[in-house]
Amino acid sequence: MGLFVTIEGVEGCGKTTIGKMIVDKLISDGYEVIYTREPGGIEIAEQIRKVILDVNNTNMDARTEALLYAASRRQHLVEKVIPALKENKVIICDRFVDSSLAYQGHARGLGIEKVYEINKFAIDTVMPDLTLLFDLDPKLGLERISANKSREVNRLDLEKLEFHKLVREGFLIIENLEPNRVKKVDASKTIEEVFNDAYSLILEALNKKSAN
Ligand code: TMP
């Protein structure tokens, strides 16, 4: 039985660090797991990622940005996510369609509905079984990433705090619209606490799926 889990949140919310901890724990608990990320995760999508996040591409149009994310999403789904689901694996994916809805739809102002429309073409009917929303005040998140010198700085990191506040607001709107799929985790807690909260939600989703 496959399970598709996505992790979402503002910059510096800890999703990458904790995502990797979740993968290690799932493997030690005997699950077959794939860890991947968006945009990227496979060669073509990593190439698209470079174009989208290049700090020199300051004149990129918001719709171009949304379409590129959707294109990279399509390729990643076809090459990696769908085959893994068919093999009954657990997929932990760092960002997915909700990032497009929050960043391009809400924060860039294209509209959540409109961005969802173009993404429907990319994802067809594939949606996550569970989305963990690592909720954090973006001010704290940006402070965390500026303290982490080894992290890459991308074009969206360069946006002002106001933009990241809208991103958080966008995620919370989606959580409100889809409470069964999107589960909020308080990412201002310690790494261990956030990990425990996230892991319990994944176990719950695994149990629910195996009962169906
Ligand atoms: P990352 O830093 O979490 O790897 O994500 C790369 C950046 O891309 C991050 O600033 C969020 C942004 N992003 C979008 O704006 N829309 C999307 O659909 C995705 C997947 C990411």
Image (cartoon, rainbow, N blue to C red):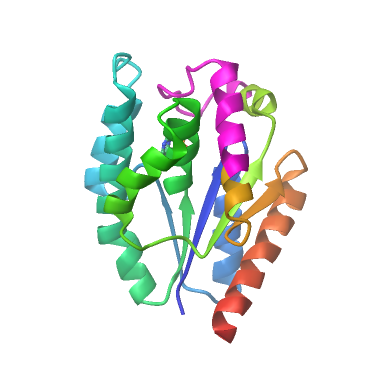
In this image, 194 relative to 48: left or right? right
Give the residue at x 73% y 57%: 197
User: Residue 57, how many percent across, how many down?
Assistant: 29, 17
Q: Start and end of the magenta stretch?
A: 145-173
Residue lying furthest bottom: 211
Q: Is residue 197 magenta?
A: no
Quadrant of the image occupied by residue 200: bottom right
Membership of 166 in magenta stretch? yes
Q: Is residue 176 above or below residue 145?
A: below
Residue beneath the point at 55% across and 84% down: 212
Instruction: Residue at 29% x, 14% y: name it.
Output: 59
Residue 201 in which image quadrant: bottom right
- Left or right placement of residue 84 versus residue 164 in this view: left
Q: Residue at x 77, y 43 (%)?
A: 190
Q: Quadrant of ligand 1?
A: top left
Q: Position of residue 153 (x, y in %)?
A: 45, 23
- 20 left or right of 2? right
Q: Is residue 124 left or right of residue 188?
A: left
Res 27 quadrant in image: bottom right
Name the residue nearer the viewer: 184 or 172. 172
Relative height, residue 27 to residue 14 (above, below): below
Rendering coords of residue 82 (x, y %): 32, 66
Instruction: Tally the numbered discs.
Output: 0
Q: Is residue 31 above or below residue 108?
A: below
**Residue 11 seen in render:** no
Q: Is residue 157 visible?
A: yes
Residue 107: give x, y in percent of width and height. 50, 27
